[in-house]
Amino acid sequence: MIILDIETKNLEAIGDGITFGHPANWKTSCVCTLELIGPEITDLEAKVFVNHEDLAKVKDAMPNATITPLNELRDYLNNSLEDGLPLLTHNGDSFDLPILSKSLEDGGAGCAEVIKDYIDAGLTVDTCADLKRWTGKRFHLQDLIQGVLGSNASKLMSGANAPKEWNAGNYAGVIEYCLSDSSLTYQMFCVAAQQGFVEANASKETTPTVVATPDWQGWLDIAVATTQEP
């Protein structure tokens, strides 16, 4: 299984040329992935991909980190698809994947073909989309984290602050945040899969909703099984 999250570098206000649910004008700053590489659900390997424009600056700021050019994400996803690894996101169907499908020159990652192949293969899992399909409600990651993992669990920063921090040169902080979101998405998914339900507040609601997650244990089984194939 690959768990993927992206951050963007747009400083414009929502509605001022950029809109959630539409990839136009969004610019990718970094993409962070976690790959399940062993039989235990904690056997994870992280990768960080950074847009070409900022690559040298990020490498200078993080000399001990392994930073990969964003144009290599396509090959990484192609190899993952060939290995049958499910692709897990939170709100990836509406946000991350459409943006990454754009060309590198347009702020994406040139991944349109491999993302289409992933979707056609039925190997994408979007926790946000699943929960909305099952309930008609939108669940934010922060609310799911606290509902499933406990009230002390939290994102490292607001998503709205990440572009500001990136443009201020806090590359390490944004990358840590992006990796943390990938990890928290995966932790929430694993717990919900194993217990068979999510209990969390939906967007703009103050009373928790209990949602059965019938498909997620099957995906987790597939994820673990693919690490054991020769």
Image: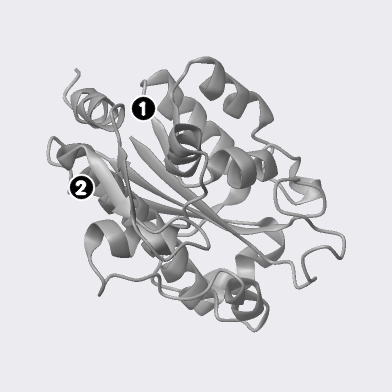
Q: Residues within 10 Å of mark 1 (few under 14, many from 20)?
A: many
**Foreground residue, 169 or 12?**
12
Mark 2 = which residue? Answer: 191
Q: Position of residue 215 (x, y in %)?
A: 31, 27
Please indicate, yes or no, whether residue 179 appears anywhere in the rendered image.
no
Q: Residues within 10 Å of mark 2 (few under 14, many from 20)?
A: some
Vertical relation: 185 (above or below) 217: below
Vertical relation: 152 (above or below) 83: below
Q: In the rendered structure, which amino acid carries the disc numbered 1?
A: Leu
Image quarter (top left, top right, bottom left or bottom right) of the C terminus: top left
**Foreground residue, 221 or 172?**
221
Q: Position of residue 41 (x, y in %)?
A: 17, 43
Q: CA distance from mark 2 to mark 1?
A: 20 Å
Q: In the rendered structure, which amino acid carries the disc numbered 2?
A: Val
Q: Secondary structure at mark 2?
A: helix
Q: Earlier in the sequence, mark 2 or mark 1?
A: 1
> Label for residue 85?
1
Residue drawn where x is 47% and y is 44% of the image: 128
Q: Nearer the viewer, mark 2 or mark 1?
A: 2
